Image (cartoon, helix red, strand yellow):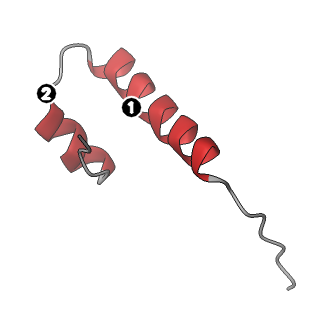
Amino acid sequence: MDRKYTKMDIGLLHLANKKVLLNLIKLKGQICRSELTKITRLGISS
């Protein structure tokens, strides 16, 4: 099977990660940064 992958620029990646985090916060309610990191495996950036 031939798969075609598209390149995602850094802006789109940032937006996708932001949507994941916001949806998780919406589902879980109050949640701390460390818990978000554990669930999503996204690093906390400054």
Q: Amino acid at mark 2?
A: Cys
Mark 1 sits on what residue?
A: 21
Q: Secondary structure at mark 1?
A: helix
Q: Nearer the viewer, residue 31 or 1?
A: 31
Density class for disc 2 (Cα within 10 Å; few <14, some 14-19, many ≥20) is: few
Q: Is residue 42 placed above or below 20 in the rendered structure?
A: below
Q: Amino acid at mark 1?
A: Leu
Q: Secondary structure at mark 2?
A: loop
Q: Nearer the viewer, residue 23 or 11?
A: 11
Q: Quadrant of residue 29?
A: top left
Q: Are marks 1 and 2 in contact (CB under 8 Å)?
A: no
Q: Is residue 23 placed above or below 29 in the rendered structure?
A: below
Residue 40 bears which disc, if any?
none
* Residue 4 location (% of width, % of height): 84, 73
State how far apart marks 1 and 2 are (Cα).
11 Å
* Residue 2 location (% of width, % of height): 87, 84
Residue that lies at the very extreme toward the bottom in this rendered image: 1
Which quadrant is home to the C terminus?
top left
Density class for disc 1 (Cα within 10 Å; few <14, some 14-19, many ≥20) is: some
Mark 2 sits on what residue?
A: 32
Residue at 68% x, 56% y is: 8
Which of the marked residues, 1 or 2, is nearer the chain's N terminus? 1
Which quadrant is home to the N terminus?
bottom right
Q: Nearer the viewer, residue 24 or 6?
A: 6
